[in-house]
Image (cartoon, grey):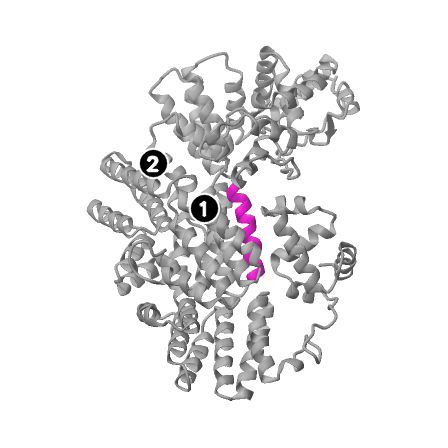
Amino acid sequence: MVTSVNPSPLPRTSTPQVTHAWPRLDPPLPEGVRVRVLRAAHGDPRAAVELASVLSARQLTGLDPLPADPASLAPATLRAHRREIRALPDDTRLLLLLAAADQYPVATHAFLRAVAAARLDTRPLDAAETAQLAHTTPGGIVFRDPWTRIAAYETASAADRREAHQLLARVLGGAGEAPRRFWHRGAAALGPSRRLAAQLGPAAAQARRAGEHALACALAERAAALTPDPHERPRLLARAAADAWQSGDGDRARRLVTATDNDALGGLLALRAGNAGDAFDALLAAAVRQAAAAHARPPGAPDPAAHLLARATEAAIYTGDLRRCREAATVADRLGIVPPGTLGGLAAAFEGRYADARDLLQAAAGRCGPGGDPTLLIHSGIAALLLGDHTGAATATARAAASARTRGETVTVPQAMEFRAYAEFWTGRPRAAEAGALEALRQAYTTGQDNGACHLQAALAMFAALTGDEEVCRDRAEAARSYAQARGLGLPAALALFALAFLDLSTGRFAASAARLRALAAFGPGHGHRAIRHLATPHYVEAAVRAGDTRVARAAHADYDHWARTIRNPDELALSARCRALLAGGPEAVDHYRMALDLHACGTRDFERARTELLFGGALRRLRRRAEARDHLHSALEAFEHFGAPQCATQARAELRVLGGLAILGGLGGRGEPSAPARGADDLAARLTAQQLMVARMAAEGATNREIAARLLLSPRTIDHHLRGVFARLGIRSRIELVRLLGETDV
């Protein structure tokens, strides 16, 4: 007789929270491997160490995917859980088996209906609750942890597992439940079955259309195991690999694709976690093959060749290789395929055909309506970024992330967030950009997208440079550059170099900054990346003028001015006018600075406007136009404090101190010393960078430096540096004061 049965469905099992406080390994794992090991170990630190200890050298460095069955590689962890399950009464174990089969490896929400259909007595579950292994809820059984659930399933006999799956399949007869019903039928199969394999394929397609890619992967992989046709198996495994990738399980996707001959999917995975040059070659070759098979495609079906060209474009963008951009554009033209605007635009820009590049990029940037394919929306955002339209880029990438979530394409979300971070920063939302990039970094590592993670590390290095976190900037830039150079990733390598150069510029190391930026702003092979070249040139001109060597800077500015005048973006034109003012110097510079500020007023890059006001204020001071200089320097200082850019703010204060205008600043006393720390939440947020604020909150909650470091993907040494900066900026000396201060302000 059934007792305590509630008809509500069992809630979907969520991914376990990753535990970060696990012992250090020597040598330490790369961050992407460490995150995925924790995920594979279901967040258990002991199981993670056990799993890491048996990985191969290539797995430890991230070159090969993690093992398919972590449970078999963490036997000590699983043995302990199995002993606890075996100590329970048989009736209790059978109920736990039924609950586990309903949740593992996919959630099917049928436990309570199965209990009712079989008229099972649920009172034996009391023994599991007493042993603290599981507890009942109105929705079903909740296990203590994922390892307990696995142990409950694996300690049962094969016959009992088949019976559990058969019972669950019988009760899954509702509308839309066919994929889960066939999953249980497939799990209960004794051996190969052509009929069942044929049924699992359409069930996987139904799950795929519903955006349930993890379920679709399980169904396709089971169909591959059950089909007696050896020629059908690679196709099913390729489909399973694609679903695993879309669901965010990069390791599973990489394992599955090795059993297929699908070069297109292999190229995509290489694009996200391998060598970008190899990825480009594989994707372009696959596009050519797909175009040759176009006659076999049903009318109205999507063109896979165009999709593969879009992916090849991303590989070309990552490498920054002009030859590859030209090659892809030539192939697209030969095949009669309209290439993505970013591909044609980059190829034209690399060749100096700026008018053509503008037209192609503008067409690509215009395709950013609501909904739509996330990849095309990301390309729209990239095109907008290249054109300097950061508002348009923010819109397109936000829509790309929303569309990816709606479609269940977990893997695409961090890529959209990756490019959105730039747009948010330059449009005046530095804290949102930094927090968003950090979350995207975590998601990129979790989903096996180490190339995207490298790009995000470089972006975070740039944000750290602009916000004055010198140690974080150097740590992240070094991590990005070492990884990028090994994988042929020109874009993040160039961005990391720009971050270090800007750090030098903002701290007065002008010659060092000019030397780094010259490599990014110059022409020819080995000179960085085209997109970063345009970002770097205005700062290179500033560094070169301050270092007293403007010969190369004048040529770099001439090319930048050509680009700015072609695309007619107000911010780019403003920066070109600022360069002209710096190169002119003296009274002649004033009109150029005024033009730059007029153009900035029509743009969105508030940080660069502040940099222009700082430089203009300094020029006016040297011309002894003190009142006007003071106005611009005050405006610059206010903007730098909003951005949390202390080194730039220090430059503004130094100029004001020379003018004698420092004492009247609102946040400073008569001797130029910081006033007592303010107690408002808004003031605290303004005083700290986004990362400092996160560190402060975690420290106030009692987390150790090592725990904070693991959660923020930084070193404990960097966290110590952050906390010292927090204490200095807030005028406090201890964590106790920090707890009290954050408690008072409720930040």
Which residue is disc 1 drawn over?
A: 482
397 on left or right of 79:
left
Residue at 47 percent across and 49 percent down: it is: 480
Taking the image as drawn, is residue 457 in sight? yes
Q: Name the residue at 37% across, 45% down.
A: 488
Q: Is residue 366 visible?
A: no
Where does the N terminus fall, quadrant-wise? top right
Instruction: Identify whether 267 is placed above or below 223.
Output: below
Residue sitting at the far left: 334
Question: Can you identify the residue that label 2 sits on?
Answer: 264
Type of the residue with mark 2: Ala
Nearest the viewer among 19 and 89 is: 19
Q: Residue 446's spot in the image, x, y percent?
A: 53, 39
Dividing the picture into quadrants, the one containing residue 98 is top right
Disc 1/disc 2 C-alpha distance (Å): 27 Å
* Stretch of the chain drawn in magenta: 430-445
Q: Could you tell whether 713 is left or right of 569 in the image?
A: right
Which corner quadrant holds the C terminus?
Answer: bottom right
